[in-house]
């Protein structure tokens, strides 16, 4: 079920009860104990209504659960404690149905189910309860009134928007204004809505001593909103879950028993509101501070000025996220040194004065930070030299500020680090002890201590 499910929590450990007794029934005696009418009455885990003109509306397809805490002192002389419930149609008080909870725990809610066969859809009923111990019984409680509603609203709601047209692309930048209408169904009390096709249930938590803790499902408008009158309408102002792309709002009408109608949907699309990202130079050099400028989407800026940007860097030494305050024209600048061994990406969103957060703008660059390796005697991917014949290998940087190179042959020899010269190059001499295939692995290190990407140089010794 989408709606009407009942959430129950585990009963808390028994503590000091301190429950106020309801009513002023004349007490009955049971083996020395005093009986009073049950308190804390609920039907369908909702508060009972003692006003015949304002009954509680509940679905009772599988019967109606009624509850009350038996009114007894601790001394019952060992007799069994129970709660008796009787119910009758308001239009026919002589047609009484009685059910009894034979075993009840003093201080805790006792529940029984009024049978579905005795409850007609659309009819109003009164019910009351009394405490029973052995042959003794308390007075009856004041009647509770409930109207059975097993029928869902006959029509799905209608959905319109004043600022985002359906079935087309719209400029974003402001909350979507929706109007929900009952579509002629006069029993509709409110609406439940979702950006997904799954709706939250209306449940009731159970507190200490089994006492239901019902809340008004319309108390907050995160998922539900009450109509301005029965069969009326409601207006929503919602920020979409995504800043751009296709969107769907799903809506169902709810009657007073929280039965849900068929689903209505409103489909629309939002153009990208992502900012523009540019660098001061066409291709920033690795590790060199570069100024970046962020500019707002013009349509977005016209609706509500951009006040800040959120910038996320990905692929550098450490991914990080930071905010930048925008100027009055919605632009902002920042200086970044990009040090991703294989490149780095920026993801940037803007935030407007009205709270709108744009979709992401992407800016990225790739780097090759591996060193260049060359040898005349032992050419890459070729063969040359021979066993015992020394060869020179030269290392050259592809990025600035390299101060050393670290190398190893065949991934088994110890690593050796050599300093770079003033031209940031370095050369080594190596003499093979065996012929065949060999592998030289080299990486460079910058002045700041950043270890760059390694390069594998393969060759064959004759």
Image (tube, rainbow, N blue to C red):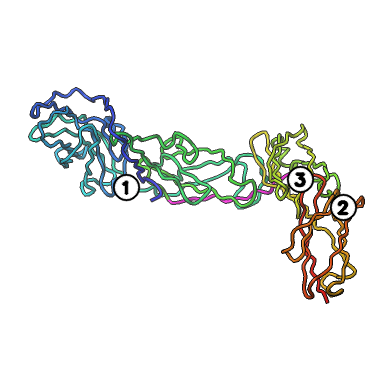
The label shown at residue 150 is 1
CA separation in Å, label 3 and label 2: 40 Å
* Crowdedness near tag 3: few (<14), some (14–19) or many (≥20) residues, C-alpha within 10 Å: some
- x, y percent for residue 140: 16, 30
Q: Is residue 383 left or right of residue 330?
A: right
The label shown at residue 276 is 3
Q: Element under label 1? A: loop
* Residue at 87% from the left image edge and 52% from the top image edge: 420
Q: Is residue 79 left or right of residue 18?
A: left
- x, y percent for residue 461: 82, 74
The label shown at residue 420 is 2
- x, y percent for residue 48: 28, 34
**98 or 111: nearer the viewer:** 111
Write the start and end of the magenta stretch as one range. Answer: 262-277
Q: Is residue 268 magenta?
A: yes
CA separation in Å, label 1 and label 3: 55 Å
Instruction: Please report contact status of discs 1 and 2: CB closer than 8 Å, yes or no.
Output: no
* Residue at 71% from the left image edge and 39% from the top image edge: 309
Task: For marks 3 and 2, give the one nearer the viewer.
Answer: 2
Q: Element under label 2? A: loop
Going from N to C along the chain, the mark reached first, 1 or 3, is 1
């Amino acid at each position: 079920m989408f709606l009407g499910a009942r959430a129950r929590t585990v009963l808390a450990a028994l503590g000091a009860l301190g429950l106020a007794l309801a009513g002023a029934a004349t007490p009955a005696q049971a083996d020395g104990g005093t009986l009073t009418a049950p308190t804390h009455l609920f039907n369908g885990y909702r508060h009972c209504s003692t006003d015949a003109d304002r009954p509680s509306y509940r679905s009772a397809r599988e019967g109606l659960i009624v509850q009350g805490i038996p009114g007894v002192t601790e001394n019952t002389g060992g007799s069994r404690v129970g709660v008796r419930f009787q119910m009758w149609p308001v239009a026919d008080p002589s047609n009484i149905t009685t059910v009894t909870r034979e075993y009840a725990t003093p201080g805790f809610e006792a529940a029984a189910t009024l049978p579905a066969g005795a409850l007609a859809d659309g009819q109003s009923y009164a019910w009351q309860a009394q405490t029973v111990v052995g042959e003794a019984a308390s007075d009856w409680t004041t009647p509770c009134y409930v109207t059975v509603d097993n029928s869902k609203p006959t029509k799905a709601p209608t959905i319109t928007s004043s600022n985002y047209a359906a079935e087309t692309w719209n400029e974003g930048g402001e909350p979507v204004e929706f109007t929900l209408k009952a579509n002629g169904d006069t029993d509709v009390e409110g609406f439940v809505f979702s950006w997904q096709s799954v709706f939250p249930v209306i449940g009731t938590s159970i507190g200490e001593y089994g006492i239901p803790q019902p809340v008004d499902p319309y108390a907050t408008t995160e998922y539900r909103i009450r109509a301005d009158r029965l069969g009326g309408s409601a207006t929503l102002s919602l920020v979409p879950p995504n800043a751009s792309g296709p969107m769907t709002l799903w809506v169902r009408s709810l009657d007073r028993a929280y039965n849900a109608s068929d689903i209505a949907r409103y489909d629309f699309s939002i153009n990208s509101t992502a900012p523009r990202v540019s660098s001061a130079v066409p291709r920033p050099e690795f590790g060199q501070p570069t100024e970046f400028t962020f500019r707002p989407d013009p349509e977005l800026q016209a609706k509500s000025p951009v006040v800040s940007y959120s910038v996320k860097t990905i692929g550098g030494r450490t991914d990080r996220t930071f905010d930048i305050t925008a100027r009055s024209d919605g632009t902002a600048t920042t200086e970044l040194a990009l040090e991703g061994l294989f490149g780095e990406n920026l993801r940037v969103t803007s935030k407007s004065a009205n709270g709108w957060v744009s979709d992401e703008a992407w800016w990225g660059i790739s780097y090759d930070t591996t060193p260049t390796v060359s040898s005349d005697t032992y050419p890459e991917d070729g063969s040359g030299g021979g066993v015992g014949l020394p060869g020179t290998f030269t290392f050259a940087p592809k990025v600035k500020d390299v101060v050393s190179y670290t190398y190893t042959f065949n991934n088994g020899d110890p690593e050796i680090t050599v300093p770079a010269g003033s031209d940031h190059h370095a050369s080594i001499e190596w003499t093979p002890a065996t012929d065949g295939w060999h592998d030289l692995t080299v990486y460079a290190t910058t002045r700041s201590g950043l270890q760059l990407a390694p390069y594998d140089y393969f060759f064959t010794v004759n």
